[in-house]
Amino acid sequence: MDLEKIRLEAESEIKAAGDAKALNEVRVRYLGKKGIITTKLKSIGKLPKEERPAAGEKINEIKAAIENDIGIMLKSIQDREMQERLKKEYVDITAPGRRPGLGHLHPLTIVREEISEIFTGLGFCIAEGPEIEYDYYNFEALNIPKDHPARDLQDTFYINDNIELRPHTSPVQVRTMEKQQPPIRIIVPGRVYRADDIDATHSPVFHQVEGLVVDKGVTMGDLKGVLSLFARQLFGEETKTKFRPHYFPFTEPSAEMDVTCMACKGKGCRVCKGTGWIEVLGSGMVHPKVLKMSGIDPDVYSGFAFGLGLDRIAMLKYGIDDLRLFFENDMRFIKQF
């Protein structure tokens, strides 16, 4: 085949290539290992010696021309494809954007922060402690020795004979009294664990907020005043409180506090079972034995303590009837608060 004819055919095929794939096929046809130009270069050895230099020069000249034409056409194809891509991917920067989805505070977090804000406004500090706790802090330091019948009331998760998952946040009160001399004013929000079956009102994991005040001259009247103020700020100024005698091994005397039913405002309904009252927390004066075991002289100091179930408070506050909703992470539920 005449070399000039090859040159013209290659030029024509390069111009006709519509995309990079077709152009590559042309390149392989002419410049590949078995291509036309490569074959011509290999055939130079069959020519007479005097003709070889001129033939090699001519073939290399045509090869260079074809390579140059392919390079120019490839650049043109790439520029065209880029323009087409830019048209397809055009972004109108003046168009309003879509707001990214934001998270939302969990109802338990909302109530915990509200309770914490109320008590910090009264001069309380927030204390924390380990969720895996020694038996001494869980029970013995709270006037609940190993043979105490109150242990039967606790469905505790035992890791071994001496270590458990804490069934209440009271161990933090003991740890605080051991490290700090009065005056003490703390609240202890946190997770607690008990071996309960899961249903609408029970869970093996739930949340508590405990409070402790220790100082000279602290009385039951101080306890009632603080908790009544707390109830009004949390549930509304019209909320009334009622204290009923109860028993807790770590307080003496002990009492449970009821508040006006927020559903019926004390008139009686299904929520309060017609009584007009709902029990929200346990409380009492810190037992002298608990003070003494923590290194505080009960003849000089006295104090009160209280504990409430955060999950129960949130259920009452928002009218939630199933505890399991708190742990299912359903955004349709969480975004309602």
Image (cartoon, helix red, strand yellow):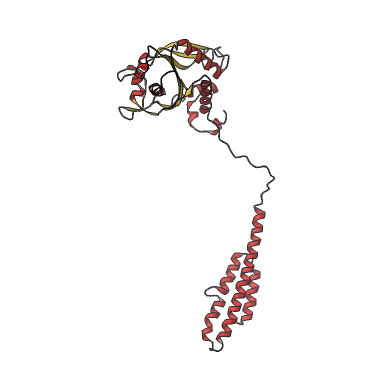
To which quarter of the image does residue 172 belong? Answer: top left
Q: Residue at x 61, y 74 (%)?
A: 66
Q: Where's residue 92, x and y in %?
A: 68, 48
Q: Where's residue 122, x and y in %?
A: 52, 19
Compared with 48, 205 (above or below) is above
**Viewport quadrant of the N terminus:** bottom right
Q: Is residue 270 visible?
A: no
Query: Left or right: where does residue 72 sit relative to residue 247?
Result: right
Nearest the viewer among 155 and 284 is: 284
Farthest residue in the right direction?
Answer: 94
**Viewport quadrant of the C terminus:** top right
To which quarter of the image does residue 289 belong? Answer: top left
Query: Left or right: where does residue 313 sit relative to residue 16?
Result: left
Q: Is residue 15 visible?
A: yes
Q: Residue at x 35, y 20 (%)?
A: 141
Q: Where's residue 27, x and y in %?
A: 58, 71
Nearest the viewer among 139 and 95 is: 139
